[in-house]
Amino acid sequence: MISTSSITDLGGSITVLASETTGDDLSAFGQDPWWLILIKAVLIFVILVLLTLFNIWWERRVVARMQHRIGPNVHGPFGLLQSLADGVKLALKEDIIPKAADKAVFVLAPVIATVPAFVTFSVIPFGPVVGVPFSDVTTPLQLTDMPVAVLFVLAIASIGIYGIVLGGWSSGSTYSLLGGLRSSAQMISYEVAMGLALVAVFLYAGSMSTSEIVAAQDDLWFGLILVPSFVIYMIAMVGETNRAPFDLPEAEGELVGGFHTEYSSLKFALFFLAEYINMATVSALATTLFLGGWHAPWGIVDLWPGANEGYWPLLWFFGKMMFFIFIFIWLRGTLPRLRYDQFMHFGWKRLIPVALLWIVAVATIRSVSLDGGIDRQYLIGGIGVVAVVFLILFFVGEKEDSDAAAAEEAEPDHEAADAYAGGFPVPPMPAGGAVRGPARSLRQSSPVTTGAPAATDGGERGGTS
């Protein structure tokens, strides 16, 4: 039986309609014995650590291939133990704490950044209900689930920002502080776009539970019918994880190393671990929400009816997740880093307005589909026309703003600026302009004309010039 319910988004400011299937679909969770819950938690931890070691090796090999290099190939078969060797090297390095650092916060910050990265995987579904080997117990391949599991992931992931900000602030370094502020502004900005991209998924699935969202994609993946949300999420997840080309908090040419400049040994390794686990988290969430989760790709079920049974769905899930991680690596090896103002401008003036417009369109389509009334084809056509008009006005207005800014920069400023305005102790420019270096002054004081003998010193130097 299908009923209409309302989902209140973030403080009740946006109310949308969704179809919700009545019934207790979360009854399979919370019934596991304590030993099985412990085994699941340990397995998730071990898988994430091993996945991090593999992803580091894979990234180095793929980028080396793109740049016509070899990459790690000495330690272990195909160089697979290189990441483990790097981890041991970091653990054995000297642990330095700057004198100006707040020691307690300095030590706690990497832990705050790393722990939420592990916790978010507790609601990710890896597969269907399976039997536990050597026992008669059945359990879902998921640690737990809740009616607001996706919001739980976003909330826990946002806690990791505190670790980065506190790490930059507690270091007692200007560069680290600037890196922490950049990172907080970037992650908060792109979390808004990421959250808005997920609203359309909630509307079509009728639930925020990860297992129910996967079940709603049994016939058709949301990544195909909600393409704008999928694209917005993929862009936002790169900005959320501080990965190239959006790795502005760690811009080596500007901030030395970003928020972790003063960290070494295991504390630096924890920040490194958190980054790669966050990559896996957003990739797993994208797989769950847009690519059908653990469901087998199309065509495989027709050839093999048991593809979605037992432990085989683990293969499909990790295969899709590794596809997104490959996208991360591909972007790092191909695109240059953006300028910070361009990056923030793109997030606030491009992604968020487009996401809001798309939410209005999806909510309207879902409301008409559930209640009937207007023909759906006419509705989609009207929304398309409005979207085209919106984009035209959007880019035309942006072009006018850029032209006005260029014209303003081209106009000479005849008024002398007060160097001490605002209380900043910036000395004024010298009366004769910028101070020239000795080499430039020498060139200007003794010009040499090409193709003609020098006007001076000709006779004294043997008549040559």
Image (cartoon, rainbow, N blue to C red):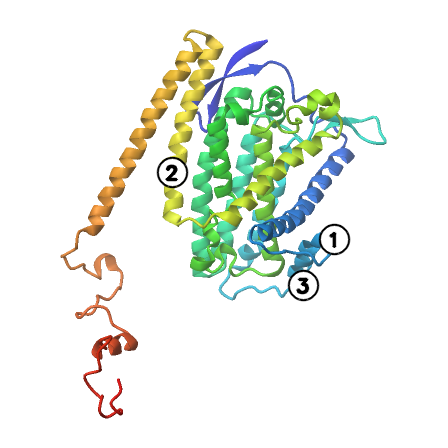
Query: Cβ–Cβ below 8 Å for labels 2 and 1?
Result: no
Observer able to see residue 143: no
Give me the C-alpha separation between circle 2 and circle 1: 46 Å
Dividing the picture into quarters, in which one does residue 359 lie? top left
* Place of residue 107 in the rendered image (x, y in percent of width and height, measured from the top left): 58, 56
- Looking at marks 3 and 1 on the same chain, the residue that comes earlier in the sequence is marked by 1
In the image, which is nearer the foreground, mark 3 or mark 1? 1
Name the quarter where the N terminus is drawn: top right
- Looking at marks 2 and 1 on the same chain, the residue that comes earlier in the sequence is marked by 1
Mark 3 is surrounded, within 10 Å at the Cα level, by few (under 14), some (14 to 19) or many (20 or more) other residues, namely: few
Label 2 residue SS: helix
| Residue at horizontal 45 percent and vertical 14 percent from the top | 367
Q: Mark 1 points at which residue?
A: 77
Dividing the picture into quarters, in which one does residue 116 lie? top right
Q: Name the residue under label 2.
A: 348
Name the quarter where the C terminus is drawn: bottom left
Q: Give the farthest residue toward the left.
A: 414
| Residue at horizontal 36 percent and vertical 42 percent from the top | 345
| Residue at horizontal 42 percent and vertical 48 percent from the top | 338
The image shows residue 65, relative to residue 302, as above or below, that is below
Asked whether 179 or 165 is in front, the reply is: 179
